Image: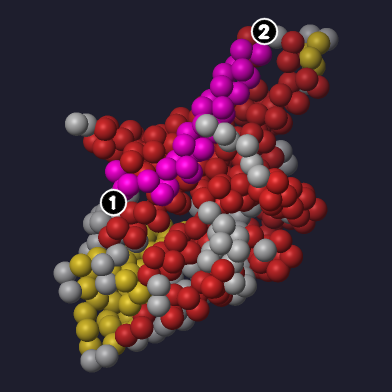
Amino acid sequence: MDFTFTAEQELLRDIVTEFLAARYPLEPSRAAARTGAGWQPEIWRGLAEEVGILGASLPESAGGIGGGPVETMIIAEALGAALVLEPYVDTVVVGGGLLRRAGGKRAEDLLSGIAAGEVVTGFAALEPRSGYDYTAVGTGAVRDGDDWLITGEKTVVTAAPLATHPLVTAVADGEIALFVVDADTAGLTMRAYRTIDERQAADLTFDAVRVPADALLLAHAGEAVAATVDEAIAAVCAEAVGAMRKVVDDTVAYAKQRRQFGVAIGSFQALQHRMVDMLLELEQAVAATYLVTLKLDAPAAERSRAASAAKATIGRAARRIGQESVQLHGAMGMTEELAIGHFFKRLTAVQYEFGTTDQHIARYAALTRP
């Protein structure tokens, strides 16, 4: 199988990498995460207007360029290597995936807004008792004339404090449905917080939130949600690969210049073995990410099996590489001044996004049974 990128895909990778190298230094981005709005809107606009990646995987009818999973993988890996906090996966991958599958004028308008950098979405799906089961929906929507009334709770909605249009799952007429809600709608309350990797998230409460008829994007959203979550898993895996590649490179570089007993610690065979193990974990993670990316258009069971295999592989690799990098840097690996500490937090959080390592091993086993 040929894994060589096309000239256009290589150009896309180079453009994104160069933009982030010039515009996204680590220290200002971490400062922005802790103050004000918790992100850099000017960077988001730059990704839309200067680089054009917010529409790279969106349909041309919505102002995108009609790219596919490989383009998303390339972009996500570059964002991961720069430790970008802005909600690319939440908005472009999850929001864009759900809206593409929903169709209709309202969805097309929102897709156009995403491509232009004007719309940010957050996926309000998980609930206090649902765990990572996206089908365990207790939030309900009932008709009231031409409108809908949504009542329920959603938890750990990443990017919710930044979102202009949260996308919400609720049971309507006995089926899991997908709604879009304006962020300032009456009856919607939000408890915002920062996650351990300094991203924005919130718990949402819907108290008979009234939305118009066209807020119902999908009446039968189960399969759309499942397919979109698998696409999000692939993107998060690619993001983790970018972060792990940077961590491995930085750790090797540090081992070459840090001296102890008069020699570089990279000359110690025991430490060389540990860095080789990190590289092996990285290469397995890359292979698993390629696999799920190429399987996103496969039948549902095959796609989900590849997604769980990739997420389990990434979870193991992120844990091993993150912990080894901190240990090889010593105590300074956990300081705010060093990038490794920030990457460690992100790699720790990745292990729990869209399901844990153990849950995906169990899902893979279930999908593999005869």
x and y, in percent, of residue 249 in the image: 70, 30
**Position of 114 relative to 156 (above/below):** below
Residue that carries the numbered disc 1 in the rendered image: 133
Q: CA distance from mark 1 to mark 2?
A: 45 Å
Q: Secondary structure at mark 1?
A: loop
Q: Residues within 10 Å of mark 2 (few under 14, many from 20)?
A: few
Residue that carries the numbered disc 2 in the rendered image: 269
Is 45 a magenta residue?
no
Extent of the magenta region: 272-301
Pick the front one: 226 or 86? 226
Pick the front one: 162 or 50? 50
**Position of 283 relative to 4 (above/below):** above
Q: Earlier in the sequence, mark 1 or mark 2?
A: 1
Q: Residue at x 40, y 77 (%)?
A: 104
x and y, in percent, of residue 220 in the image: 26, 67
**Position of 4 relative to 184 (above/below):** above
- Residue extending furthest bottom? 145
x and y, in percent, of residue 51 in the image: 71, 61
| Quadrant assignment, res 130 | bottom left
Q: Amino acid at mark 1?
A: Asp
Q: Residue at x 36, y 83 (%)?
A: 214
| Quadrant assignment, res 242 | top right
- Residue extending furthest left? 174
